Image: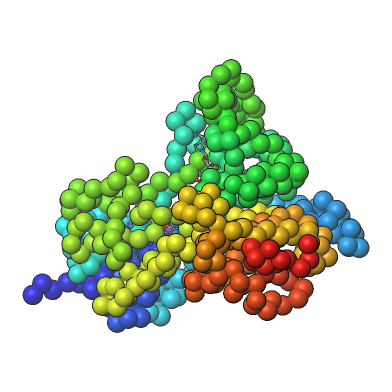
């Protein structure tokens, strides 16, 4: 029988990889995790979810004070931006959380192999010149920014940047152009707009936020415009020249036509992310990627190579930290001989702008393709808590199967939509009908009552409208 150094070797310590490693160790497997970054936690903790939320949260306070929202509630302040302190609290949040993972690795006896791993064969990898063997290997190498041909990113110069560069700008740009009206562009565009930048979003498609419900996409565009963002939809960037501290972009209608130029002090390229497989030497194990560069897996996260599994951003599905984490738990459970389940139909998504935008399950468009639906919608304007808090923008929409009443999707725009969507995900996980939600007692006054009212709307009887 073959002897291995480890039962499991995970490559990559992002939310997918570190969670898989900890869960496997908890289940009694001798586990190692290779990570080339200087700190654990992957994209999410180091340059993604956490630092972006640190800047979003702080800039939200700044705008509330500077934009008059607090004054209207009787709190008069004249804020002064100290960007260095704002960055320091972001760095502090990242430091605390990444060290927390290091502590959890030690506590659970997961060996951190420091360095980038490459395959020698399906059970053998090389990390920093050392060879390690494992009975099972999980690839959790995540994703990186998709480059845009003709627009060269150089984070060190702070002129043309990706999300990592946009988190660390040393001063507020006067004019920021965001290429790509997706999640990153809107979140980081919001940060700098709140701190004083003029923000223009250039989006190739005719609406922002592809993949979300069309009502949500249209309403989001109205809200961002109202907040002062300029939106150039159905527009593509065809070139970028940088002179000193200024960039000039060339734009064209997506369908073709006359070009125009747009000047900027800073350009954020946020047109998506692509899986990290380069450098793994997949050719040494005969593992091929699909057309999108992803590693295909079955429901046990097995690749086409015996003993090698994959999870997180490197496999198909939404590129979200919580999806990667759940896959991390499930893959460890499969490897330990248990049954690991991830319901890929019920993965919530949240955009942490103001207000927040969240959804779970099918969009109305996708649900209608499968059959007849009933839809209930309730505006936040009619929700007592949102109205009292001066947060009138947004709505909740519940989409249910017309025949069975089973909830197929829930979409919200609300100040706390990210928190509200959890109950919708849980209800859908339990196969709830809209009636189940409508007859669940919700605390008053809460924003979540809007979910109950939208569910009542599916049955045709909201109270407060
Ligand atoms: P990653 O987190 O990308 O981790 C992979 C790790 O593998 C990296 O640390 C990398 O260094 C390491 N690695 C790669 N190759 C090797 C190798 N050969 N050997 C050793 N190590 C290797 N998602 C959310 O759900 N909510 C959010 O609010 C959110 N905000 C985001 C904000 C930004 C700005 C960005 C960029 C992303 C955000 N995301 C968010 C997405 C989220 O970060 C990813 O979906 C998540 O990190 C994916 O986890 P993962 O474990 O698959 O990969
Ligand atoms: P995205 O896919 O969300 O958005 C990219 C946008 O760029 C799309 O609207 C697309 O149509 C547009 N686009 C593509 N090519 C273009 C071009 N040439 N010109 C103009 N527009 C173009 O990607 P992202 O915003 O870069 O985020 C990457 C990933 O990170 C996403 O999958 C997202 O799930 C994840 N993320 C999640 C969160 C969150 O959960 N809150 C936050 C940030 C990032």
| The quadrant where residue 318 appears | bottom left
What residue is shown at x 33% (from left), y 78% (from top)?
25
Q: Quadrant of the image for the N terminus?
A: bottom left
Q: Is residue 341 above or below residue 146?
A: below
Image x and y of residue 344, in percent: 42, 62
Residue 425 visible in rendering: no
Image x and y of residue 286, in percent: 17, 50
What residue is shown at x 72% (from left), y 38% (from top)?
198
Residue 320 visible in rendering: yes
Lateral position of residue 58 relative to residue 363, left or right: right
What residue is shown at x 65% (from left), y 54% (from top)?
353
Q: Is residue 368 above or below residue 162?
A: below
What residue is shown at x 13% (from left), y 73% (from top)?
3
Q: Is residue 206 above or below residue 116?
A: above
Q: Is residue 275 or residue 460 the one in the foreground?
A: 460
| The quadrant where residue 397 appears | bottom right
Q: Is residue 11 or residue 169 the one in the foreground?
A: 11
Lateral position of residue 122 relative to residue 256, left or right: left
Image x and y of residue 19, in percent: 40, 70
Q: Is residue 203 above or below residue 48?
A: above
Image x and y of residue 248, in percent: 60, 26
Lateral position of residue 195 relative to residue 297, left or right: right
Ligand 1 - quadrant of the structure image: bottom left
């Amino acid at each position: 029988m073959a002897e291995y150094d480890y039962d499991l070797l995970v490559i990559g310590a992002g939310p997918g990889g570190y969670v898989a490693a900890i869960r496997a160790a908890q289940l009694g497997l001798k586990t190692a995790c290779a990570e080339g970054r200087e700190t654990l936690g992957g994209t999410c903790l180091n340059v993604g979810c956490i630092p972006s939320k640190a800047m979003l949260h702080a800039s939200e306070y700044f705008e509330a004070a500077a934009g008059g929202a607090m004054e209207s509630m009787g709190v008069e302040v004249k804020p002064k931006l100290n960007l260095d302190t704002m960055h320091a609290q972001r760095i502090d949040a990242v430091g605390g959380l990444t060290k927390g993972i290091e502590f959890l690795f030690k506590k659970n006896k997961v060996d951190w192999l420091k360095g980038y791993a490459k395959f020698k064969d399906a059970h053998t990898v090389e990390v920093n010149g050392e060879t390690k063997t494992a009975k099972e290997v999980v690839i959790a190498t995540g994703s990186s920014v998709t480059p845009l041909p003709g627009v060269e990113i150089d984070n060190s110069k702070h002129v043309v940047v990706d999300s990592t560069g946009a988190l660390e700008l040393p001063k507020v740009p006067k004019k920021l152009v965001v290429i790509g009206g997706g999640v990153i562009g809107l979140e980081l565009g919001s940060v700098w707009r709140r701190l004083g930048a003029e923000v223009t979003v250039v989006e190739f498609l005719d609406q922002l936020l592809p993949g979300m419900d069309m009502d949500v996409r249209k309403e989001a565009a109205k809200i961002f415009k109202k907040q002062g963002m300029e939106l150039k939809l159905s527009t593509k960037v065809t070139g970028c020249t940088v002179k000193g501290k200024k960039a000039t972009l060339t734009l064209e209608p997506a369908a073709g036509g006359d070009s125009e130029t747009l000047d900027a002090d800073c350009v954020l390229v946020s047109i998506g992310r692509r899986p990290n497989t380069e450098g793994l030497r997949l050719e040494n194990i005969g593992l091929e990627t699909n057309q999108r560069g992803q590693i295909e897996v079955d429901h046990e996260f097995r690749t086409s190579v015996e003993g090698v599994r994959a999870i997180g951003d490197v496999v198909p599905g939404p590129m979200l930290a919580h999806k990667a984490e759940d896959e991390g738990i499930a893959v460890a459970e499969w490897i330990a001989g248990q049954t690991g389940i991830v319901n890929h139909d019920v993965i919530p998504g949240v955009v942490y702008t103001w207000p927040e935008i969240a959804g779970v399950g099918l969009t109305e468009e996708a649900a209608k393709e499968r059959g007849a639906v009933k839809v209930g919608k309730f505006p936040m304007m009619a929700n007592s808590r949102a109205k009292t808090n001066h947060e009138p923008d947004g709505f909740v929409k519940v989409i249910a199967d017309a025949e069975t009443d089973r909830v197929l999707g829930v979409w919200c725009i609300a100040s706390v939509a990210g928190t509200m969507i959890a109950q919708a995900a849980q209800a859908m996980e339990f196969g709830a009908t809209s009636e189940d939600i409508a007859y669940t007692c919700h605390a008053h006054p809460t924003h979540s009552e809007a979910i109950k009212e939208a569910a009542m709307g599916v049955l045709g009887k909201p109270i407060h409208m």
